[in-house]
Image (spheres, coloured by chain):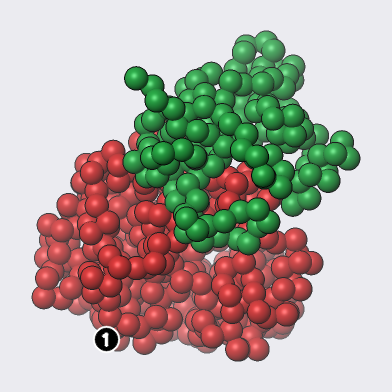
Amino acid sequence: MQRVLDAFPEILIDHDNRFFYEGLLNQELVLNRCRDCGTWHAEPLRAICAACHSWNISHDVVSGSGIVHMVTMLHQGPPVPGVSYDPPLPLAVIELDEQPGLRVSGKLIGSGADLTAIGKRVRLVWPVGQVAPRLAFQLVDDK
Amino acid sequence: MKFSNPAKDKVAFAGVGRSRYSRDLNSTDTPGTTTLRACVEAIQDAGIAPHDVDGVCGSMVNSQFVQESLGLGDVSWFANPELVFGNQLIAAINAIYAGAATTVLVYHTTHTFPFQSKKAAADPLRQRAAKLEGRSSYGGFYGTGHLESEPFGVAGPTPYAAWAARYMHQHGVGRDELAKVVLNAHTHGMTNPEAAKRIPLTLEQYLAQKMVREPLGIYDMDIVVDGADAFILTTAERAADMRRKPVLIHTGTLGRAAHSTDIGTLDLEHTGQTVVARRLRESSDIDVTSTDLLYLYDGFSIIVLFWLESMGFCPRGEAARFLNANWDAAGNCVRLRGRVPLNSHGGSLVEGATQGAGHVREAVRQLRGDAPQRQVANAQTALVMIGGILYNSQGFLFRTS
């Protein structure tokens, strides 16, 4: 627990979201999944399944592969160690392969990482040099 | 099931007030002080005594502070609903209709936080307030949902840029087309002496603007101000005997879709806006697309296009073309059916970011015939849509009788 508190000092870590952040430290994308009906949940992370009201929730690793749902290019932003806005930082929302509507956001990288990337395929990557691991998605050639 | 609206035309605006909207941040007015300035003006405008107020309802400034500071008497109802501003109005309408209070002081305050501007960041008092209140631009700012904002996540201010990018990509809308919303705002801001920004803007300047969250630039974002608006709401019956010409609340609603998070919202056909649109249409005696006045929330320019489509002015993806077709080239502004202005005060883009309070105030003043320099002749109905597409969509129809 202390490890995740130290790594993400700006985040309100609690018992509902710590699995996600612990996952980041292990270079894994961990989301909530209902053990009873199998439904995945991302934001907001919570202790219940919205589909069947089961409290039997597991914290499972997803593949991190999916489609770029939308993108914005940050030309400026809050000053954060290890983050540069020059060149503009592409921040994307990814619809994951596991389930329609299951989306997460993170940095978009690779050739063509701009507003035209909407609809393109990505995979989860872990760039080196981050202050703490965060989600990043690399555009892949899906020919 | 059809949306019932028993409060139809039963509650009215009887007074309006506002503080100055300040951008220079040199003012010593605290959020409390701007709120009190607006509230005093609203009470005076309505021609009532402080003790006539028996309900208080506002946004960030605590209702107890307002009651105590203004020497109001005993109150039987009070609330501090969350933003944006339609929440405060709906709460007050419901309270008055239900008999919880008869005369309610409703206010909204806006205050620039250190993470919103460089000037604000240089103010040691704002720095301290932000620190002690735990406000920051990312990490939990939006409550318990664990939504991270920029630069790591799409939440808070970033989703509108992302949804704009997807919309523009899907429908082939260019930034030159989005420009119409912003040019219209600047044209009207010039006629509003109380607007925080009163400068003309050309298409060339718009296209050359500094990008912030591409595809949205600095002119696509509302401008943060320090300031407050206040209103007196009471029963239509009482308002008829009061000093000002009453403005009736014909209908109003909040709306939130089943999935409403920044990134989890299904698509533009399943948003708070589409919920609001359906409820307003069902509860209004007036065709929502044919009012004399039109106010569409413009916290980001793109939201105006989303509202036009959600309300049925034009099909999805066609709003920019719709604005072009209704463009008054000589006046450099939108004129629906050659007549109806859009955001006649300049909107949040130029008057100041008031989370909808400015749109409401302008609609009320226009309907009272009290909007010098920009009065729309014989305006009797107004459509006022507040909030964006996600979790804070709201809408109202006001009329004179």
- Pick the residue in front: B289 or B350: B350
In percent of width and height, residue B10 lies at: 43, 59
In percent of width and height, residue A37 lies at: 62, 11
At a point 41% along the width and 84% down the height, the residue shown is: B194
Q: Residue furthest right?
A: A2
Type of amino acid under label 1: Gln
Helix, strand, or loop for circle 1? loop
In percent of width and height, residue B113 lies at: 63, 70
- Judge from the rendering whether residue A74 lies leftward or rightward of residue B321; answer left or right: right
| Residue B51 versus residue B327 in the image, above or below | below
- Judge from the rendering whether residue B376 lies leftward or rightward of residue A63; answer left or right: left
Q: Please identify which colour was used for chain B in the image.
A: red
Where does label 1 land, which residue? B373
Q: Quadrant of the C terminus of chain B?
A: bottom left
| Residue A121 versus residue B9 in the image, above or below | above
- Is there any visible trace of residue B38 in the rendered image? yes
| Residue A7 versus residue A28 in the image, above or below | below
- Pick the residue in front: B204 or B269: B204
At a point 61% along the width and 21% down the height, the residue shown is: A62
- Judge from the rendering whether residue B162 lies leftward or rightward of residue B87; answer left or right: left
In percent of width and height, residue B254 lies at: 48, 48
Where on the picture, by quarter, is residue B185?
bottom left
- Pick the residue in front: A134 or B344: A134
